Amino acid sequence: MAESESSNTASHRVLVSLREAARIIGAQGATIQEIRESNKVKIGISPHERGCSDRILTCSGSIQSAANAIGDVIDVLNHEDQEPEEYTYKPLNFILPTPSPDEIQDVESIKRIGNLRLIVTNSEVSSIIGTQGSRIKSLIEKHGVKIVASKNFLPDSQDRVVEIQGFPGSIANCLVDISEILSKEAKPTHEKRYYPHTKSQEEGSVTKVVPIPVEYVGALLGRGGNRVSSLRKYTKTKVIVSDEPNDEGERLFTITGNNQNSVKLAETMLLKNLETEKQRREEKTVSKE
């Protein structure tokens, strides 16, 4: 996600592999802490879901600081002298090929070029591309980067990957422009966001992670947890709620069941309860005015 929270702040979501996540975090969290402190941003990586090959990096702060931090992340990953990995989980495989010597004469410069998998909603992709591709073409020409959007949604979501290839500084500058575009054009939507989830290693077990804004968690749990307890019994699933919110102010509801249908039912009921609570609060606010 590359959405603007206000006129001068932005929040980005980036798809990373397990190996990339480990490099970004660094020994005892030193690398990510350095990026956090030097750029004055909130940055973190989603928990590793068992049996899952991807994680999500989130970074928020001022438009410039958030972009610079992502540039630093790309720089960290560029120091890994290994051939690009071929992933079983297809969204992790880069769409854009590595630049050829014909494109960039300096071999050392090629080593500094990195790829970013930016997670954005389908509507945000349209804003980035612009009318007849005019905006994405302008971004490419202005910053000397390559940009391509995935054709398919990430699993069980309405998110897509916008891949940006270039030097870390060029990618950061491009992100600044993207954030400014979205701050002016993107509107709040109810598009389903992507979170890493997979079938559990235990045969027949399915897991789904649902993020819920902190301010609605209490209502969804119910007094003494009775509401979520009823949901567990009705759907025959396990529902575990994270103790602490993530960097986006959400607590994660992890739903586990013996089959896809029961997990899907629990997810649907949970999201329906969320929408009902939102509407209740909106109506209450209107009635006071």
Image (tube, helix red, strand yellow):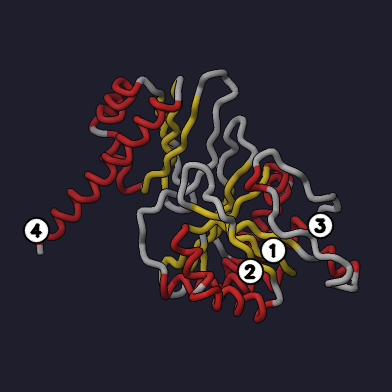
**Residue that numbered label 4 is attached to:** 287
**Residue that numbered label 3 is attached to:** 79
- Quadrant assignment, res 287: bottom left
Q: Residue at x 45, y 33 (%)?
A: 254
The image shows a total of numbered marks equal to 4
Please provide percent x and percent y for residue 124: 47, 64
Amino acid bearing label 2: Asn
Q: Residue at x 81, y 65 (%)?
A: 99
Which sits earlier in the primary sequence, circle 4 or circle 1?
1
- Quadrant assignment, res 276: top left
Which sits earlier in the primary sequence, circle 4 or circle 2?
2
Please provide percent x and percent y for residue 54: 62, 42
Q: Residue at x 63, y 69 (%)?
A: 68
**Residue that numbered label 1 is attached to:** 72
Tell whether 102 sits left or right of 242.
right
Please provide percent x and percent y for residue 74: 71, 60
Q: CA distance from mark 4 to mark 2?
A: 44 Å
Contact? badges 2 and 1 (CB < 8 Å): yes
Amino acid bearing label 1: Asp
Q: CA distance from mark 3 to mark 4?
A: 58 Å
**Residue that numbered label 2 is attached to:** 68
- Quadrant assignment, res 289: bottom left
Element type where label 1 sits in the image: helix
Q: Which mark is residue 60?
A: none
Contact? badges 3 and 2 (CB < 8 Å): no
Amino acid bearing label 4: Ser
Above or below 75: residue 192: above
Q: CA distance from mark 1 to mark 3?
A: 11 Å
Q: CA distance from mark 4 to mark 1?
A: 48 Å
Q: Residue at x 46, y 51 (%)?
A: 158
- How busy is the neighbourhood of tag 4: few (under 14 within 10 Å), some, or many (20 plus)? few
